[in-house]
């Protein structure tokens, strides 16, 4: 196996719940891919499953990594491309699943489970997946839930599971650093990792060192996950934050009596605009909506050509006011509810959306720019909504407050 010495040292780890965490460039995914292959080859009839939040993202990452490794090592296998399932000569299998269609995995009995980019998933998904480690082979030999994580803040539920809760006795954490992997990294990559130390200390600790950032200074505390089943919204809004290497995010928000309900989410890397629009259309169709039923779709103003494509696809697409602090105030002024099951990335981001700290540890009125794509999208939507429809003024008038308006 072409792994670095530290990865080779841990390749036979048999912990039931194993977290692999660490910095960029440390080849966490490569380690996970080797573990999945090794388990399948060692134990006949083993049922191995690889998950990621979306199937599309999984196809572009660890799925390709595992196929390339099998070909590289000249290991015989059969591949069912339609089902994304690999079968080996010993009748073991590796199946690949996205968690965006969660109902399809409830009947699974697994011996080995790998979750790639586990920081993307919700606690609900994690708790459901851990119940699936109940296959016959795992009972005879050992079963393992292996999660690959790029650390975020200490508010993340995975930090609590693996570092602070009573479950810690049943878990193990392995930390990989890019420094363990220098033999395989181009020098320019290493230089970029180290440059972050001067540019953004929080990002350096998180991305380059692979550390969990202290979860203090929460920006939003006024939200919950309570959404009535029979609610009828006054109108619908949507928004988009554009990315490619970073995820693109498209959200649908229902407004009821001045309160905002985040009820639909597309959140995925590697999407060109045409693909993002297609996925947005599919999401709306699942929700029995249509682009014309959205009052507005508020988009990242940095890319006007992508906004125009949304307009040509039937969306009332408008440029966002990207004022960060004023936008945060607009979000804080709006009661906020999140559908945790259908919007897992939004639920994850909002828990970890924090203010930066200076070198002395004092909070700065500036958000940490790490995994904030849903937070930017919500800010675009609600800031424009509050400005256009004067929500704070309306709410204050309802409360009996007198407001002097500037003409």
Image (tube, rainbow, N blue to C red):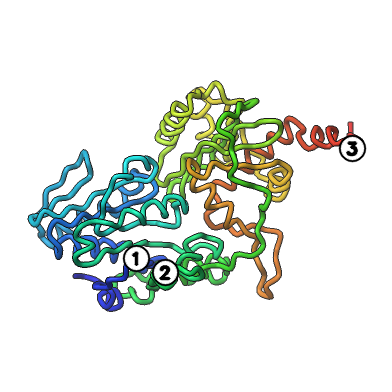
Q: Quadrant of the N terminus?
A: bottom left
Local secondary structure at mark 1 = helix
In primary-sequence order, the first of circles 2 and 1 is 2
Local secondary structure at mark 2 = strand
C-alpha distance separating marks 2 and 1 = 7 Å
- Tell me where residue 138 appears, x and y as whole percent: 23, 62
Q: Decide which of 219, 30 is in the foreground and name it.
A: 219
Q: Name the residue: 54% across, 49% down.
A: 347
Q: Decide which of 198, 82 is in the foreground and name it.
A: 82
Task: Give the label, 1 or 3, closer to the camera.
Answer: 3
C-alpha distance separating marks 2 and 3 = 52 Å
* Residue 216 in which image quadrant: bottom right
- Tell me where residue 402 appears, x and y as whole percent: 92, 36
Instruction: Confirm or deny contact between disc 1 and disc 3 (CB under 8 A).
Output: no
Q: Name the residue: 64% across, 31% down.
A: 255
Q: Which mark is drawn over residue 401?
A: 3
Q: Decide which of 109, 363 is in the foreground and name it.
A: 109
Q: Decide which of 138, 67 is in the foreground and name it.
A: 138
Residue 195 in view: no
How many marks can you see? 3
Q: Relative to 67, does residue 396 appear above or below in the rendering?
A: above
Local secondary structure at mark 3 = loop
Residue under label 2 = 22
Residue under label 1 = 28
- Tell me where residue 391 appears, x and y as whole percent: 76, 34
Q: Name the residue: 55% across, 32% down.
A: 229
For this view, does 12 lie left or right of residue 44?
right
Q: Name the residue: 32% across, 61% down.
A: 145
Q: Which mark is drawn over residue 308?
A: none
């Amino acid at each position: 196996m072409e792994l670095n010495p530290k990865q080779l040292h841990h390749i036979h780890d048999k912990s039931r719940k194993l977290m692999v965490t660490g910095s960029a460039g440390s080849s966490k995914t490569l380690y996970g891919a080797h573990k999945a292959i090794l388990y399948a080859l060692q134990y006949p009839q083993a049922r191995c499953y690889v998950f990621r939040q979306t199937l599309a993202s999984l196809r572009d990452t660890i799925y390709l990594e595992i196929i390339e490794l099998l070909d590289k090592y000249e290991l015989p296998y059969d591949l069912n491309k339609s089902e994304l399932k690999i079968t080996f000569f010993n009748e073991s299998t590796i199946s690949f699943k996205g968690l965006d269609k969660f109902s399809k995995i409830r009947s699974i009995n697994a011996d080995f489970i790998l979750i790639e980019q586990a920081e993307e998933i919700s606690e609900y998904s994690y708790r459901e997946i851990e119940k699936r480690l109940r296959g016959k082979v795992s009972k005879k030999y050992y079963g393992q839930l292996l999660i690959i994580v790029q650390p975020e803040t200490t508010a993340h539920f995975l930090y609590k599971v693996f570092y602070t809760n009573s479950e810690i006795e049943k878990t193990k954490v392995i930390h990989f650093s890019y420094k363990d992997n220098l033999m395989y990294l181009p020098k320019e990559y290493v230089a970029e990792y180290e440059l972050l130390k001067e540019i953004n200390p929080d990002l350096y600790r998180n991305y380059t060192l692979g550390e969990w950032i202290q979860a203090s200074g929460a920006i939003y505390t006024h939200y919950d996950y309570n959404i009535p089943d029979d609610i009828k919204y006054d109108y619908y809004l949507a928004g988009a934050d554009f990315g490619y290497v970073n995820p693109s995010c498209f959200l649908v928000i229902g407004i009821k009596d001045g309160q905002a309900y985040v009820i639909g989410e597309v959140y995925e890397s590697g999407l060109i605009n045409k693909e993002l629009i297609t996925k947005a259309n599919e999401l709306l169709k699942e929700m029995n909506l249509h682009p014309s039923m959205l009052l507005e779709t508020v988009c990242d103003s940095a890319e006007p050509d992508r906004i125009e494509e949304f307009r040509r696809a039937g969306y009332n697409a408008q440029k966002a006011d990207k004022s960060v602090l004023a936008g945060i105030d607009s979000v804080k002024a709006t009661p906020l509810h999140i559908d945790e099951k259908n919007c897992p990335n939004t639920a994850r981001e909002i828990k970890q959306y924090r203010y930066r700290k200076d070198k002395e540890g004092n909070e700065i009125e500036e958000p940490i720019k790490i995994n904030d794509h849903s937070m930017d999208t919500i800010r675009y939507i609600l800031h424009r909504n509050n400005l256009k429809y004067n929500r704070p003024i309306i709410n204050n008038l309802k409360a009996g407050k007198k407001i002097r308006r500037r003409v």
